[in-house]
Image (tube, rainbow, N blue to C red):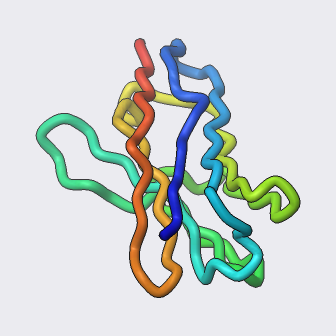
Amino acid sequence: QVQLVESGGGSVQAGGSLRLSCAASESIFSIDLMGWYRQAPGKQRELVAFITSGGSTNYADSVKGRFTISRDNAKNTINLQMNSLTPEDTAVYYCKALHGNIYWGQGTQVTVSS
């Protein structure tokens, strides 16, 4: 069973940046896919970005060009660099891993003020 722990959330003004990290309890080298989702109040959870074990990435249209997902196999961590943040990016951000089963982290709050 993979345990995921997110960190790096917080409050920032519009135009600012944050970097989220997701640490896995075991090697991510063989984890098929890891990604970030977010859920804003009153809205459904949505995909932000994912990265495969081969390093392929995919982004939601709303974050393309602003967010960058990366993985550090040596540290068993994936990261999400978020730039040019807007209030619409305010949400709880969750890390997800697909490795046989689906695993979720507990989430980290990101708040962007105008």
Q: Which residue is drawn at 82% across and 64% down?
A: 73
Is 45 or 84 nearer to us in this picture? 45
In the image, taking residue 68 as reference, residue 39 lies left or right, namely left
| Image quadrant where residue 103 sits | bottom left
- The answer to which image quadrant residue 28 occupies is bottom right
For the residue pair 21 and 100, the one nearer the viewer reads as 100
> Picture coordinates of residue 90 (x, y %)?
37, 30
Between 104 and 44, the one lying in front of the other is: 104
Residue found 34% across the figure and 35% down from its top: 91
**In x, y percent, where is residue 41?**
18, 35
Q: Relative to residue 98, is residue 26 depicted above or below?
A: above
Q: Position of residue 20 (x, y in %)?
A: 62, 38
Quadrant for residue 51, please give it. Answer: bottom right
* Residue drawn at x 44%, y 50% as measured from the top left: 105
* 75 relative position to 88: left or right: right
Q: Please state the total of marks drawn on the protein image.
A: 0
Q: In this view, does 13 lie above or below 23?
A: above
* Residue drawn at x 58%, y 34% as measured from the top left: 7
Decide which of 46, 83 is in the foreground and name it.
46
Q: Is residue 72 left or right of residue 9?
A: right
Judge left or right: residue 53 versus residue 104: right
Extreme front residue here? 1
Instruction: Name the residue at the right extreme.
Output: 74
Q: Quadrant of the C terminus?
A: top left
